[in-house]
Image (cartoon, rainbow, N blue to C red):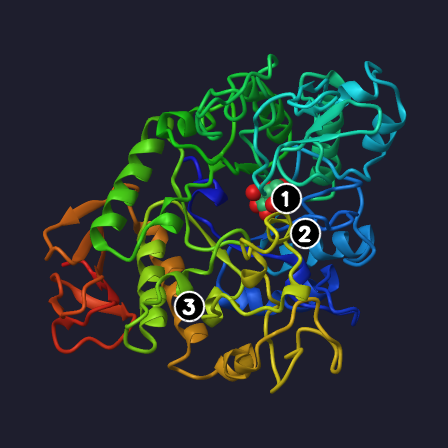
Amino acid sequence: MTRTPWWRDAVVYEIYVRGFADSSGDGEGDLRGIRSRLGYLRDLGVDALWLTPFYPSPLADGGYDVADYRDVDPRFGTLGDFDALVADAHAHGLRLIVDIVPNHTSDRHRWFRKAVAAPPGSPARDRYIFRPGRPGEGPGEEDPPNDWPSAFGGPAWTRLPDGEWYLHLYATEQPDLNWRNPDVRHEFEDILRFWLDRGVDGFRIDVAAGLVKEDCYRDLAGRGVRTANGPVYSRPEVHEIYRGWRRILDEYDERMAIGEVWTDDPDDLALYLRPDELHQVFQFDLQLAPWSAAAFRDVVEAAVTAVAPTGAAPTWVLSSHDSIRHITRYEQPEGVPGIELARAKAALLLLLALPGSAYLYQGEELGLPEVVDLPDEARQDPIFKRSDGGQLGRDGCRVPLPWSGKSEPFGFSLAGVRPWLPMPAEWASLTVEAQEGDPSSTLTFYRAALALRRRLVPGLPDDLEWLDSPAAALFLRRGPLTCALNCGENPVRLPPGRPLLTSIPPYGDLLPGNAAAWLASP
Ligand code: GLC
């Protein structure tokens, strides 16, 4: 019998390293902080951790601007701390996935410094994407080489004093690499081995669809930038890269890779999951769905269908370091107070009942909301800066975790230290300490759901079956487990089965609105 690979039904917990736990007292999270909390993560009941980038970086984009791919930023620790973290995580039964950022480097990376110092047309510039501009309107003026936008606002091109423009699909400080250059390929294959040899269990590939651009650099001319096989994302050439990576991963035992692929085309997603490519891709649609049973059902069906031909399992995610926390997305302006927490707990029971693997984001187990009222001067996200404050950006979901105590930094850092983003005073009631041992807390609920899922998973088939339900609800069955989710306001009759876990107490055989239940199928 072949064993199910560990990632296929894993619950993975995303750690935003800078905001998880600070052991050094500089106000930013670090690797030793994570190490000191492994017991918490094991007891929470997750299977694996995904660490956001901790590599040396000027943090122009929270570490997704890497200056050295083979080291740890001093503010986050040392390579020795990393090795100790891998060993301890494994000793706690936790796998470790690290983020790899191959689409772009930091502008402080040695390659980019060399490129800037070298003349146009030189081999050093060929590792990035440098192009001449186009004549602009006024005399002597120049426009960027084409109309591609940066995902963070403004054009995707910046001009150097010598007149050449370089491409950055993200911030100016994140120049895109030229994946048609063999140096780039070899470098990243070597970087993969560097971390595999240190014992990582997998990689989360940042901007996985963007690595190879069409080499004529034509205008988008109104087409969406995410269009599959357009000039920017999901070019056919990108797959050859992942075939090479897969050969490397397969030289090691049980290592995996998950791609961050935003695409509007499910067939495109499936291409990354061919047996000689990636093990998983993120399926982000639950994150985008409104609070509606019909919408959730559509998303689940589409996601399952998209991966079905590949044999890979789907992946599910409600929140991440890039999106508004789902509890806040589920708020209703005129709703009953607390409705968003009720919904978030119900959504967890849906998420964890689905086939495949679930990615949780740090703090959702505490019911942390998005922090919407950060002062402008505290905000760090380049999206905020590049839009002149027009878009708040992603800092609101990156505020450090509250662990204990009654005031900032709530055990995130040493007493008296100001964390890198201010923490709301109201979080005193949301700390791990405040929730631990409280049978009605969100944390207790997450632990119960994760523990039960772990018990049930080995007996659950991959397929799911929809049962008849009232329109505002969805009932799904996976063999011995039935999950009922009621997105409406009025109670619905529960489907048959013995209740195992409910997000709020049912009344008899009625499931209240904004609630979910797991039942043992009859
Ligand atoms: C990914 C990351 C995001 C980052 C971007 C550029 O989308 O998740 O945080 O800003 O890539 O690297």
Residue that protrudes farthest toward the front in the picture = 139
Residue 99 in the image, given as x and y percentages of width and height? 63, 44
The kind of secondary structure element at disc 3 is helix
Instruction: Locate the C terminus and report the quarter of the image it occupies.
Output: bottom left
Of the two numbered discs 3 and 2 on the same chain, state the one appearing first in sequence: 2
Of the two numbered discs 1 and 2 on the same chain, state the one appearing first in sequence: 2
Of the two numbered discs 1 and 3 on the same chain, state the one appearing first in sequence: 1
Is disc 2's CB within 8 Å of ligand 1?
Answer: yes
Q: Residues within 10 Å of mark 1 (few under 14, many from 20)?
A: many
Q: Label 1: which residue?
A: 99
For discs 1 and 3, the disc positioned in front in the rendered view: 1
- Establish if 140 lies above or below 6: above
Q: Which amino acid lies under the numbered mark 3 shown in the image of this protein?
A: Tyr
Q: Label 3: which residue?
A: 446
Is disc 1's CB within 8 Å of ligand 1?
Answer: yes
Q: Residues within 10 Å of mark 3 (few under 14, many from 20)?
A: many
Which of the two residues, 133 or 193, is positioned nearer the viewer here? 133
Residue 335 in the image, given as x and y percentages of width and height? 28, 73
Q: Is residue 461 left or right of residue 404?
A: left
For discs 1 and 2, the disc positioned in front in the rendered view: 2
Marker disc for residue 61: none
Q: Label 2: which residue?
A: 62
- Establish if 434 lies above or below 50: below
Residue lying at 30% horizontally and 49% vertically, measured from the top left: 460
Q: Is residue 197 left or right of residue 517?
A: right
Residue 383 in the image, given as x and y percentages of width and height? 60, 49
Q: Which amino acid lies under the numbered mark 1 shown in the image of this protein?
A: Asp
Q: Quadrant of ligand 1?
A: top right
Q: Does residue 457 show up?
A: yes
Which of the two residues, 441 or 218, is positioned nearer the viewer here? 218
- Establish if 295 lies above or below 276: below
- Establish if 143 lies above or below 91: above
